Image (tube, coloured by chain):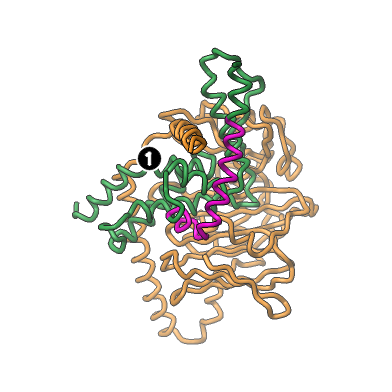
Chain colours: A orange, B green
Amino acid sequence: MDDDRVVGAELERLAATDPLDPIDPHAMLTRGRRSRRTRRLVGAGGGVAAVAVVAIGATLLPNLNATTPDADAAGTDLSSEFSAVPGVQRGEAGTGVQITYAEANRRCALRYPEVKRPLRPAAKAWAGAINLFQLQRGDSKADCMVPGGDKPSAALVAAAQRDPVPTTQAGQLRNCSVGFWTDLTKWRVLASDVAPGSVSSVVAMSPSGKSVVECVLMAATQFEPARMFQNSQIVRTPVQQHTFQAAFKMNTSNEDGFHYAVGRMSPDIVRITIEQAGHGKHEIKVKDGWYALAWLNEHPSGLGLQIIGYHKDGSTDVRVA
Amino acid sequence: MVDRDQEYVEFVAAASASLRRTAFLVCGDWHRADDVVQDALCKLYRSWPKVDRGGNPLAYARRTVVNAALDSGRRPWRREVPTAELPADRVSYGDPAVGHAERDEVLTALATLAPRQRACVVLRYYEDLSIEQTAQILGCSEGTVKSQAARGLDTLRTAIDQTRRIGRPA
């Protein structure tokens, strides 16, 4: 019993170190209302779209597969749209690697001069991954995607802002290049998916085969601008291969019903379906283990969400979320 | 504002800080804890009409938060910045920062626990929930809760004792 009290008291003291401002209940109410409204609108929109499809007729059905970005559009030459970053190697050499905390601070200060704080102390930092700026009471939360050596032009940034969730692979690579400050435009897309207007995901390999980018792009919400999802990253090969269960144990959804995941799993799995019981269903193909998922679930009740991985031999892995 | 929304606002005002503290203890990062709680509260709003407000909406929210906090740590492709860097040199007895040093040690010990063991400890000894309530939230048996909480308690108690022995000469 004494142990209970001692540990309880220590946990109380840890919990009392909360450095963040209180959650604004009215802001939460606004967010909740918007979330509910979005779901209703999406549901209604889906119904209208379904009616329209029937009216147009079967001749256009092949085009319904347009949620898979156009593979031929990748590889657009935009190399002139990037300039060097002082002290950072160009291309894949400048990213996806471990760097010192000091170097991460230097790069983040270059990229985000308006943030006057250092990064949170850490023994390790990576270029091509998110690091957090230090936070004190009253500060707004700020992240730094530690940049590589290819600073995008203003025109490229503007193009990405105009089209934050591209429906082509070229557009995805362009926007991810802007997010990482690394020219990814000639990288080879291994898998991609898009929920138009909502979320887009892509995994691509560098021309040398030594690096892989996993990138998720999200549309603006009432609370956040259009952005590259914080788990997006550039890593060196070989990329860790996850089991099906591990891949979808990740936090791959948000409260508005957006589902997104990119990475590599067993090459035995050839396709994945994600389905809300009695409602929407989405399917992606898995090629050599590479997968990219982007799906807007119109009825995100949180119940009855089932993800199934289909193996070559016909067997399945099932995850119920 | 309709009554239902007013009740929701009052609930958020009353419960959000507590939920964030719980989420922090489970996931070890204030930023993630904040995200987890806001996501959970947003979900709660959508379910608010269905939630048995005469019952215990806090239990519903707590279950959502704890499980989301557990999930937030299961991101194998996310490279995290460590949430607690241990100080390079230990502070001496009498140092006013000794409390912070102790917290670091306990936080580190907490982080070494397996996620569900950590959740058991937090729910049992921080939230003061019963074994039955903890088992319901985590979706496991009461026996599992007992064994996990006991092991976690033992680990934490050892860390606390060690800290006191080193930081506070007898």
Q: How many marks?
A: 1
In this picture, residue A20 sits left or right of residue A29: right
Front position in the image: A139 or A309:
A309
Q: What is the magenta segment's predominant secondary structure?
A: helix
Query: For residue B152: magenta?
Result: yes
Q: Residue at x 66, y 22 (%)?
A: B88
Quadrant of the rendered image containing residue A119: top right
Q: Which residue is mark 1?
A: B17
The extreme bottom residue here reads: A58
Q: Position of residue A171 (x, y in %)?
A: 59, 57
In this picture, residue A137 sits left or right of residue B152: left
Q: Residue at x 57, y 27 (%)?
A: A118
Circle 1: is it few (<14), some (14-19), or many (20+) Cα within 10 Å?
Answer: some
Residue A259 visible, this angle: yes
Judge whether A304 appears above or below A131 on screen: below
Front position in the image: B88 or A240:
B88
Judge whether B22 appears above or below B160 on screen: below
Q: Which residues are magenta?
A: B133-160
Q: Residue at x 54, y 50 (%)?
A: B72
Q: Position of residue A309 (x, y in %)?
A: 63, 71
Judge whether B34 appears above or below A321 on screen: above
In this picture, residue A236 sits left or right of residue A39: right
Q: Position of residue A66 (x, y in %)?
A: 55, 72
Q: Residue at x 19, y 51 (%)?
A: B1
Judge whether B7 appears above or below A301 on screen: above
Query: For residue A212: magenta?
Result: no
